[in-house]
């Protein structure tokens, strides 16, 4: 279990980083509770040249200002006034790249996760979506700007590796407004066969 260091996040290729995040573990220590999950789905947002990005053409707002900081920082924003969506800022200062974490498989702190999600057992609905995973791990918009090499929210490399054909690339979800950029293969997800196999191993 090795905490992922700053160098991982400071690289230029946000699409490659997004793919490499599959199989990494996202952990939180919030309200005295440790929870974690393995990342199984991500989306890359390629900053100023990506019409789907909050920072397209270097657009700058109070909400997305954290994207212009150094990589290795949390960017959490509210979607539809309900869902807290967790993103990882990458690249160097003033180059606003980010990766949206779309889904995890819960691993540690299952009792806490289930309580937060008001569930009795882990199901596909527990954290298989960007809003539900944030709720499961206790992440909120107030966490935006947190250093991901610290002890509140961080990522670990636990030497989990997948074959190339176990990770599928495709277009992102809910970004139709981005025109041709909506079709870019910037979403990565473990195949359902692999996900179901892990679910059977962990929760049965």
Image (cartoon, helix red, strand yellow):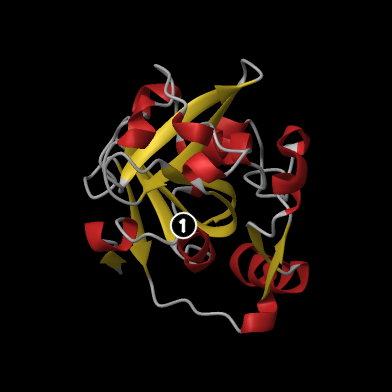
Among the 4 quarters of the image, the one containing residue 63: top left
Q: Is residue 78 above or below residue 45?
A: above
Among the 4 quarters of the image, the one containing residue 138: top left
Residue 43 lies, in percent from the top left, at 59, 51
Quadrant including the N terminus: bottom left
Q: Secondary structure at mark 1?
A: helix
The residue beneath circle 1 is: 14
Quadrant including the C terminus: bottom right
Q: Nearer the viewer, residue 64 or 108?
A: 64
- Please report the residue visible at 45 percent of the width from the left and 64 percent of the height from the top: 24
Query: Tag 1: Cα neighbours inside 10 Å, few (<14), some, or many (≥20)?
Result: many
Q: Nearer the viewer, residue 192 or 172?
A: 172
Residue 50 lies, in percent from the top left, at 58, 43
Q: Is residue 120 above or below residue 160?
A: above
Residue 105 lies, in percent from the top left, at 58, 56
The answer to whether residue 112 of the structure is visible from this angle is: no
- Please report the residue visible at 43 percent of the width from the left and 19 percent of the height from the top: 61
- Left of 138 or right of it: where is 91? left
């Amino acid at each position: 279990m090795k905490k992922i260091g700053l160098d991982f996040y400071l690289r230029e290729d946000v699409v490659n980083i997004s793919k490499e995040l599959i199989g990494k573990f996202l952990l939180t220590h919030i309200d005295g509770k440790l929870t974690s999950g393995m990342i199984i789905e991500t989306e890359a947002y390629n900053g100023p040249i990506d019409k789907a990005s909050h920072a397209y053409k270097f657009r700058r707002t109070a909400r997305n200002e954290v994207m212009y900081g150094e990589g290795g920082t949390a960017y959490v924003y509210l979607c539809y006034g309900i869902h807290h969506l967790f993103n990882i800022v990458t690249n160097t200062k003033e180059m606003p790249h980010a990766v949206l974490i779309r889904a995890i498989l819960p691993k540690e702190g299952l009792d806490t996760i289930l309580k937060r999600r008001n569930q009795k057992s882990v199901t596909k609905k527990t954290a298989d979506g960007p809003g539900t995973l944030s709720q499961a791990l206790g992440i909120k918009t107030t966490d935006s700007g947190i250093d991901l090499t610290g002890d509140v929210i961080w990522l670990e490399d636990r030497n989990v590796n997948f074959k190339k054909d176990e990770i599928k690339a495709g277009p992102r979800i809910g970004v139709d407004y981005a025109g041709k950029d909506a079709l870019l293969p910037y979403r990565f997800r473990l195949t359902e066969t692999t996900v179901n196999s892990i679910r059977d191993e962990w929760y049965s």
